[in-house]
Amino acid sequence: MVTLLRGVLIALSGLFLLITPALAEAEIGFEADAVTVNQDDGSMLATGNVVMTQAAMTLRADEVRYNREDDVAVATGNVEFIDNDGAVHRADIMTLDTEFTHIVAETLRSRYPDNSFFIADEGDIVSGGTSIFDSSRFSACNCDFENGETPIWDLRATSTRHIAETKTIVHSNVRMHILNVPIGYLPYLAHPDWTVRRRTGFLAPSFLLSSDLGFSTSIPYFVVLGDTNDLEFTPYRFQRRGLAVKTRYRQKWDRSDLNVALYTGSLNTFKKNRESVAALDGIFSTTIGDDWNVKMRARRSSQDTFMRRYKFNSDTWLKSSAVAERIKSDKYYYVEVSDMQSLSSGTAADHEPTILPHVFYEDVKPGFRNGQTLKTEINAIQLDNDEGHDMSRWVGNVEITDRLSDGPVKTDARAGVIGSYYSIQKNPAAAATKTDDLGRITPMASVSVRYPLAVSTKRGTAIVEPQVQFAYVGGTDRTADIPNRDSADYRIDPANLFLLNRYQGYDYLRPGSRLDMGVSVQANTSVLGRVSGFMGVSQRLSGKPSTGLAVNENSSLSDYVASLSAKPFNKVSVSWSGRLAPDDLKLNESKTSLSGTVSKLSYSLEHMQLAKPYFKSASSDLEELTASFTYSLGGGWKVIGRQVWNLSNGKTVRDSSTAAFSWTGGLQDCLTIDFGYDRDLDTDRDIKADDQFTFTMNFKYLGSISKDVIKSTLLSNN
C-alpha cells in the first residue's frame, strides 16, 4: 500500500512540474505523502515526509508550501537542507528560491563537512555570495550541539558574515567562550573558513621563555604570491639579545621544488653585542632527463653559534651540496659536489671537507653462467680539507659471485679485484702517510658454506644456520702510505662479517687471509614470539691485524659479534647487539633497547656503551641511558617525557631532559594545549646550558600561540 501511494504521489509530482515551469527547468525531484495544488494561482502544499532534490542538493521537511508568484518555497517542521558542498542546515522555518541558491532560515543550525558549525537566530545564506548570520555562534569543534553537548570553544557575535568569494568569516562584537565561560572580547575578528589552505596575512604569534634569551616573541607575516609559491617574513625580538628576521620563499613546479630560508639579525654573540649576522638554507630539487633526481642545497652561516643559540637550528655542521642520482633496476649512478662548514668553535679551517667532485657508478648483471652475478663499480673523488688531507682517488672494482651448490649445503664463491690510484697532495704535519702518486691492485676471493637446519618442538619452530667462510685479500699492504678517509670508523659487526671487502671503503685494504664463522637463528616460539639472533667471530690466518676488529689488535681473533631480538607476547620488543673481547669476553660495545605498551603507557629504554680505545684521547668508556615514555590520561590528555643520563666514568649524571603535558581536544578535535620543558646542557663559546619553558594553545582555524620546539623533539624520539 505504501509503495502504491508513493507511485501515485510521484505521478502527482509530474503534474506539479508541468504547472510550474520554473521548477521543471531546474530539474527538481519531488516526493511527499500528500500534495494539494491550487489551480487558480499555481500554489502547492506538500505534507508528510517531503523530499525535494536538485543536483546534489536535498531539502527535507514535514511541510513545504510553494508560491508561484514569488517563486519561493517555504519549508516548516524538522527542516533539513543539504547543499552542494555537503553542509547540513537545519531550521524551524526555511524559505528557499527554486534554484536552492538562496535560503532564509529562523533558528538556523548549520554543520559543515569539517564538523565546524554555525548557530544563529536568523540566517540568510547565498550560494557563492555573502551569507549573514544574526546573533551567531561559531565553533570548529566536532560536538553534538543539537543535543546539548558543549563545544570546547566557540565565538559568539551579534552578526557574522561568511564571504564565499574570499573564503572569509567576519565576526562583529565577538566574545570567545571556552567551555561556556567568556574569556575575551573583540569588536571585530576575521579568519579563513574551512576551505582555505593558504591566506595572506599575519599568522599566530609565538612566545618562548628561556633562561638565556629571556622572553622572546615572533609574529610571522605570510604572503601568497600564486597557486604554487609564497613568501613568509618572521621578525624575532629576544628580550636580552637583539632582533632577527627569517625570510622564507617556497615555490613548486611540475617536477621541481624550491625552499629557501634567509636568517638576518643584529644579535649578541661571543664577539660583541649586536653583531650583524646572516645564514642561508636553501633547497632546490628537480627531476631531469631519464629519471635523474637532482638536489641542490646551500647552507652557510656568517657566525658559528648564533643559529644554535637562538633556536633557529641545532646542527653543528652545515653542508652545501649538489647531488645527482639515478636508479635503475640493475644500475646506480651518483654524482656529488659538496662543502662542509663547522659550527663548533674548536674546528680548524682545514678540517672542513670539500668534495669536488665524487662520481660513483655500479652495475649488477648476470654473470657468465646460471647462478653467477657480476658487479662492477667505478668511483672517483677529489677530497680537500679532510682533517688536513687533500687527495684524489680513482677506483675500479669488479666482483663476481657464483652459487656452487644449492642443495641442503649451500656453497657460494666470490672473487674480485679492486684497482685504485691515488694522488695525495697534502697531509697533516704529524701524518705518517706519503704525499705522492700511488697505485694499488687488490685481488680478493672467498668461499662460504651454509647449512640451514629446521628444528620443531611443541613450543615453536626455528631455523638454525651455521656459516663458515674462508676469505683471502692479496696485493701490497699500503695502509701506512694511503690515508684512511672512508673506513676510519670501521668496526666489525654482524652485517659486515661475511662481506668480501668488509671495510666497505677503498682506502683501508689490508692483505691477509681469514676464517669467518657464525651461526644465525630465526624462531617462532609461544613465549618469546618471533626471535632472531646471531653470533660470529673472525680468525686471522695470515697478515697483520686490522684496525676495528678488536680492542686488542694483536689477537688473531676478532671480537665476538652478537645480536638478539625478541617480541614476547607481542607486547614488548627487546633487542641487544654487542661485541665481546675474545680473551675475557668483556663487552667492548653494546646497545640494548626495550620498548612496549602497558595499558595507556608507551615506553622505550635504550642503553649504549663503547670502549674507550675507539675514541681518540678518551679518558674512559662511553656509556649512556635514554628513557622515553608517553602516557595517555584519557579525555585527550597525554604526558610525554624523555631523559638522557650520562653513565661514563662510573657516575650517573642527568643530561638533557624534555617533557610535555598536552591535550588534543579529545573527540572534538578543535583545540590543542601543550605545556613543555626542555633542558639543554650543550655549551660552546656564547651558548650556555639552557632551561626552556613553552606553552601552546592551538585553536582550529584561528591559529596558535606557541614556540613548539618541545613537541617535535619528543615525537621524533618516540
Image: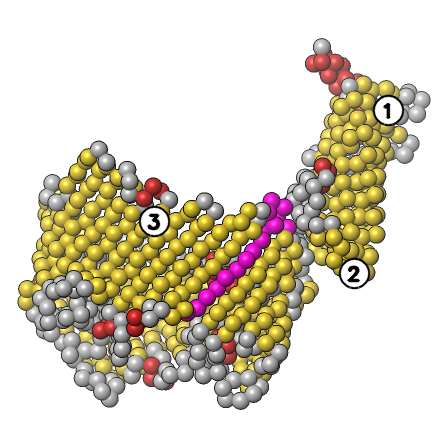
Numbered badge on residue 186 = 2
Q: Quadrant of the C terminus?
A: bottom left
Residue 704 magenta:
no
- Residue 316 seen in the current view: yes
Marks 1 and 3, how far apart in space? 71 Å
First of labels 2, 1 by sequence position: 1
- Identified by mark 1, the residue type is Met
**Whole-percent x, y for residue 202 in the image:** 68, 65
The number of numbered discs placed on residues in the rendered structure image is 3
Disc 2 to disc 1, how far (Cα)?
47 Å
Residue of label 1: 44
Q: Residue at x 78, y 59 (%)?
A: 185
Q: Which residues are magenta?
A: 655-670
Q: Residue furthest right?
A: 40
| Residue 395 visible in the displayed image | no
In the rendered image, the vertical position of residue 484 relative to residue 707, given as above or below: below
Q: Position of residue 310 (x, y in %)?
A: 53, 75
